[in-house]
Image (tube, rainbow, N blue to C red):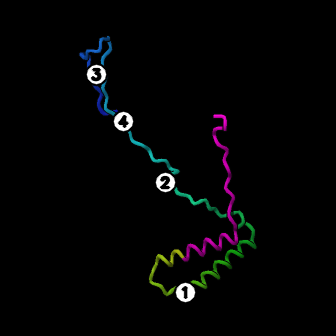
Amino acid sequence: MSILVVRSFSGADCDTDHCLVVAKARERLAVSKQSIQKFDGERFNLRMLNKMEVRKQGQTEITNRFAALENLSDDDDINRDWENIKENIKTSATDSLGLQELKQHKPWFDEEC
């Protein structure tokens, strides 16, 4: 909050010995960081990459999917190509790595409140 102007009026007739104070203030609302970052709730289980057989499986899946895309990529639409690449990476990562379970946080208040 920023206070712009403050004035006191000693001659105001309020029937007391206090002075009347008038202030102009400006308040800016802060945008929370949680609302800026949109998260779809999917996280890959990256700890599975420490296992060599899972890593090899993921590499072969991505290689096979992109080999299939090379035959089909005669389109001029770059956005459609990007969506295909993104979906292929996501599906192959989901198949080989799996999704990480999100932790359920306890609420900060209980039912009695």
Mark 1–mark 4 distance (CA, rounded to whole Å): 59 Å
The residue where tag 1 is placed is 72
Find residue 38 and report its horizontal and vertical position in percent: 53, 57
User: What amino acid does circle 4 point to?
Assistant: Ser
| Helix, strand or loop under label 1 | helix
- Disc number lying in front (4 or 2): 2
Mark 3–mark 1 distance (CA, rounded to whole Å): 77 Å
Q: Earlier in the sequence, mark 3 or mark 1?
A: 3
Q: Earlier in the sequence, mark 4 or mark 2?
A: 4
Give the label on residue 2, or none. Answer: 4
Q: Is residue 34 magenta?
A: no
Give the label on residue 8, or none. Answer: 3
The residue where tag 2 is placed is 36
Mark 2–mark 1 distance (CA, rounded to whole Å): 36 Å
Q: Earlier in the sequence, mark 1 or mark 4?
A: 4
Of residues 112 and 20, the one drawn nearer to the viewer in this rendering: 112
- Disc number lying in front (1 or 4): 1
Res 111 → quadrant: top right
Find residue 51 and report its horizontal and vertical position in percent: 75, 68
| Helix, strand or loop under label 2 | helix
Find residue 2 and report its horizontal and vertical position in percent: 36, 35
| Helix, strand or loop under label 3 | strand
**Magenta stretch bounds:** 84-113
